[in-house]
Amino acid sequence: MNVAVLLPSRIRPDSTAWPADAVTAFDHGDADILVWPRESILGVAEAVAAAGLVEWRNRFTADNVVERVDEAMAALELDCPALADELASIARDFLAQFDLGAGLLRLECSDRAGCPKFHCDNVRVRLIVTCYGGGTEYFFKADPERHEQAPTNALVFLKGHKHPTNACSILHRSPTSPPGERRLVAVFDD
């Protein structure tokens, strides 16, 4: 049975948002999910409360990631420089970790579940960061009665259908939120 890898919340003081060796082990291993808990960013709650309920998506490269994140933040009317810096760093690290020339960034502020049905994505790898609100829900197909929820601001790496070692052992979805409760999520795809 493939198991989720839950790592400690301390981030090493290096230049990446996660330890590259742990994500490499996930990428080459048999687990279909890796959850890396992290501390929340100050100021996000206030920024989300004032943000527009919008979804923004665009391709990015290492050369234009800052501009793309700035566009996303402006489109959602999000005023949180620390969050913008964090998203740009995660995007750069995502490209480097998976040796990609470009990626797709989706930033969404919503008050309803974006993907309410459990599913596996048609990508090689997806990184989901719920910056505010309920974290991504998931379950192991081998134990469908036991649902898990990633902590807010955790990095959730998921293998998709296009990943060579995906065993389709994990299904995930956006959580159901109480009416009017906002959720801010950033999704990085290959």
Image (cartoon, rainbow, N blue to C red):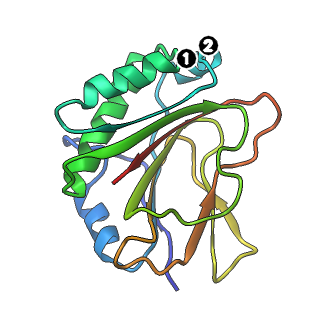
Tell me if 130 is positioned left or right of 95 in this view.
right
Q: Badge 2 local density, few (<14 within 10 Å), some, or many (20+)?
A: few
Amino acid type at circle 1 is Ala
Q: Is residue 36 above or below residue 71?
A: below
Q: Residues within 10 Å of mark 1 (few under 14, many from 20)?
A: some
User: Residue 156 or 118: which is nearer the viewer?
Assistant: 118
Q: Secondary structure at mark 2?
A: helix
Q: Is residue 1 above or below residue 183?
A: below
Name which residue lies at 32% across and 40% down.
Answer: 90
Quarter assignment of residue 29 = bottom left
What residue is drawn where x is 71% and y is 76%? 144
Q: Is any atom of residue 20 visible in this view?
A: yes
Give the vertical position of 18 relative to 3 (above or below): above
Contact? badges 1 and 2 (CB < 8 Å): yes
> Which residue lies at the image location 29% right of the left edge and 75% below the top edge?
28
Residue 12 shows in this picture? no
Horizontal arrangement in the rendering, residue 182 relative to residue 79 (left or right)? right
Residue type at mark 2? Ala
Q: Which of the numbered marks, if any, corresponds to residue 47?
A: 1
Label 1, label 2: how far apart the Cα atoms are = 5 Å
Residue 8, image x, y percentages:
42, 55
Q: Quadrant of the C terminus?
A: bottom left
Q: Which mark is residue 50?
A: 2
